[in-house]
Amino acid sequence: MKLIVWLWNPWPQYNNTRHNIGATMVEKFVKREQLGELKYDNKYKAEFLTFLWNKEGGETEQVLFANPQTYMNASGDAVTLLANFYKITPKEILVLHDEIELPLGKIALKSWWGAAGHNGLRSITTKLASPDFMRLRIGVGKASNIGVAEYVLQPFKPNEWEVLEWKEEEIFWFMREFLKK
């Protein structure tokens, strides 16, 4: 079984912000693939969806998409509850998140190499007691004239959305690659 998690702040005032780009892309993927509806369960502090994914060679695998309903900095609570219940190892987890160290629209799939100041990743690592999960880093760029927290909580400008819309297929490709393994 695999788990795909996106890091975000789940309140309306954070919609369309740089910090929530992982959520935006996974929601588009779920809709495009017609995977179903996420349902909230307080036991896991998350909305989630389980489905069977058709792998190459005709195999299927159960997949869990999870949308933590905590502040991003406490994402590890939901991830750990789901991973423990479903017996999912860290190597079977993919986390999508914003990345200020990458230029806008740059996408990188990485195994763990540090939180780089991202408190959502730090929370997951601490709660899982392991850094061995995959990360799909979505570049949002970095502003030099304002603080990081202020920058990532700002909405994207229209021209920035255009860049990210061009990157959707690449993001979806990385997600499919993770699901193939």
Image (spheres, rainbow, N blue to C red):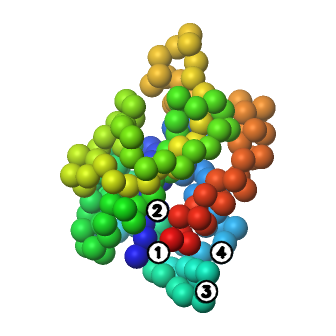
Name the residue: 56% across, 13% down. Answer: 144
Name the amino acid type tagged 3: Gly
Q: CA distance from mark 3 to mark 4?
A: 21 Å
| Classed neighbour count for the residue bearing mark 3: other residues with Cα under 10 Å, few (<14), some (14–19), many (≥20) | few
| Classed neighbour count for the residue bearing mark 1: other residues with Cα under 10 Å, few (<14), some (14–19), many (≥20) | some
Residue bearing mark 2: 4
Residue 171 place in picture, x, y as percent: 64, 53
Q: CA distance from mark 1 to mark 4?
A: 14 Å
Query: Are the residues tagged 1 and 2 within 8 Å (C-beta)?
Result: yes
Q: CA distance from mark 2 to mark 4?
A: 16 Å
Q: CA distance from mark 3 to mark 2?
A: 22 Å
Compare marks 3 and 2 and give the one earlier in the sequence: 2
Q: CA distance from mark 3 to mark 1?
A: 17 Å
Q: Is residue 111 visible?
A: yes
Residue bearing mark 1: 63
Query: Are the residues tagged 3 and 4 within 8 Å (C-beta)?
Result: no
Up the image or down, 176 lies above or below 19; here it is: below
Front of the two marks 3 and 2 = 3
Query: Are the residues tagged 2 and 4 within 8 Å (C-beta)?
Result: no
Residue 178 place in picture, x, y as percent: 53, 64
Identify the element where label 4 is drawn: loop
Residue bearing mark 3: 57
